[in-house]
Image: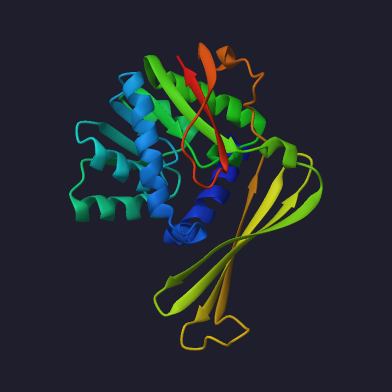
Amino acid sequence: MKEYDNLLSEIQFFYDELGERYELIYPGYAKLQKDLAHSILSICDEFDATVIADVACNCGWLLQELVKLRSGLVLYGFDISKRAIDIAEKRREKEGLNLHYSTGDWLRLPEIVDTRFDAVLCLGNSLSHLPLDLQFAALIRFSSILNPGGILLIDTYRNWNHRFIKKVIVEPKGLSCQGSYRVFVCFANEYYDSLVRRHVSFSYYSLAEDRALRPHKVECFSIRQFPVILNKDTNVQEFGFKHKSMCQIRDEMEMFEYYLLSK
């Protein structure tokens, strides 16, 4: 588990440092989460899923939208980032929402939860933070915390596994305002055969100096990601599931493809 724990420390550091800046990456992120919540609720209704866990909840945006849509849901959020969970808790308390948050990593979830869920959500291409062997183990853990007949909704970036050819791709992301600054966000991705190093930068330009070429400050955070184990030919019975299907979900950015695994 030493390799796994070292990787967890890297992931935790990245998201602890990123914190609320995550919302700056995608302008209109709150609306995107609201639209996603409507789609997820429709799927959960098909399977009578009312006890739901988001195992990569970050700052809790999606769960906050779900509980506003349907107050009778029992919602749990887990994330490796203590800072993200702290932010989620503050928002929960401020808005008086009935949500349950906890820090936790995927391979130890069965040890830290005493609840079984009707649905588990793992979104935002989060599975790719682990290499393939650990993804296999994580999917088995997700299955183990589901009730019989429960579902796992999981996504990846479109054509994600086809990107792993040695190259560098720069992706401009968002331009938005924060306080007295205009913030430009950009990804620089170093792709190799079996991993990508993703560097996300935040450049802050003063609103009072709209002609300035140089930013007032620049922040950069880096993380590794890997190909994903799921594809159209994956045998999900190896993970403890019975069926797998592609799932159509409204995604205004058209960034993701969604898999629905049922137990």
Horizontal side of 259 relative to 179 (left or right) equals right
Residue at 30% x, 45% y is: 64
Residue at 58% x, 74% y is: 218
Q: Quadrant of the C terminus?
A: top left
Picture quadrant where residue 38 is located: top left
Picture quadrant where residue 46 is located: top left
Q: Nearer the viewer, residue 175 or 199?
A: 175
Would residue 60 be seen by someone viewing this image from the given angle? no
| Image x and y of residue 187, in percent | 63, 59
136, above or below 158, in the image: above
Picture quadrant where residue 75 is located: top left
Horizontal side of 112 relative to 152 (left or right) equals left
185, above or below 252, in the image: below
Horizontal side of 70 relative to 14 (left or right) equals left
Q: Nearer the viewer, residue 104 or 19?
A: 19
205, above or below 46, in the image: below
Horizontal side of 146 relative to 75 (left or right) equals right
What colouring method underlies this structural image?
rainbow
| Image x and y of residue 170, in percent | 70, 59
Q: Residue furthest right?
A: 166
Q: Nearer the viewer, residue 139 or 22?
A: 22
* Count of all numbered marks drawn on residues in the image: 0
| Image x and y of residue 225, in percent | 64, 44
| Image x and y of residue 90, in percent | 27, 55
Q: Quadrant of the N terminus?
A: top right
Would residue 154 be seen by someone viewing this image from the given angle? yes
Residue at 72% x, 43% y is: 195
7, above or below 52, in the image: below
